[in-house]
Amino acid sequence: MKELLLLLLLSLTFRLTLSGSVSESQSVSLLPHANESFNISYIQMKNAGSCSYFVVISTSCSSPRYTSDQISIAFGDAYGNQIYAPRLDDPSSGTFESCSSDTFQINGPCAYQICYVYLYRSGSSGWKPESVKINGYSGEPVTFYYNTFIPRDTWYGFNLCNDAASSYKVSAQKWLILVILGFVLSFWL
């Protein structure tokens, strides 16, 4: 009887763990999207300090040779810390030429793990970034792969913050199940 109960508990734990992993992987969006409701004026500075971020933007070889468009960037963490650079471009210096990478040092509020980035393009030349890599104050460097033209006059990018929060929630649920299972098994063994 104890063996059957143990087998049933292990099977239940495996199923809950597996179902959490499957739903977790399905919710991650790997394609950039337009965010019409993104509000750049909503910048919270929960951390009073100022931190430096190194941002490397690689322009695709299929982008126009150069762009005269104005390019802006906003990125941040899941806690509302947002870093904003209103204009990165400088046509006279060759910024954002095709098949090139440009590095920027951007100062802003100290953020935790960067989980979203949006680019904004204003102009008629067009521009196709390949990737955006952000080395932040804390957390691991993160790279977002665009490889698509940025639409005109809209914030366009990635927001993986909700996915990170749900991942933590699923991990906490797995941990709780394993603790309960260990507690139950300690009485039978």
Image (cartoon, rainbow, N blue to C red):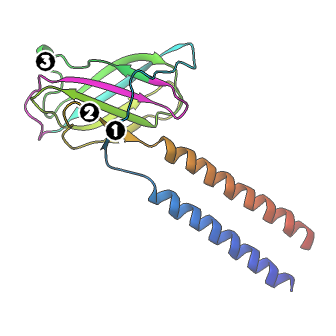
Q: Position of residue 111 (x, y in %)?
A: 52, 25
Query: Mark 3 or mark 2: which is in front?
Result: 2
Asked whether 134 or 39 is in front, the reply is 39
**Which residue is label 1 attached to?**
35
* Dot 2 crowding, Cα within 10 Å, few <14, some 14–19, many 20+: some
**Which residue is label 2 attached to?**
154
User: First in sequence: mark 1 or mark 2?
Assistant: 1
User: First in sequence: mark 3 or mark 2?
Assistant: 3
Residue extending farthest right = 187
Q: Secondary structure at mark 1?
A: loop
**Which residue is label 3 attached to?**
91
Q: Secondary structure at mark 3?
A: helix
Q: Please provide the residue range marked out in magenta.
A: 61-82
Tag 1: residue type?
A: Asn
Q: Position of residue 168 (x, y in %)?
A: 60, 47
Query: Mark 3 or mark 1: which is in front?
Result: 1
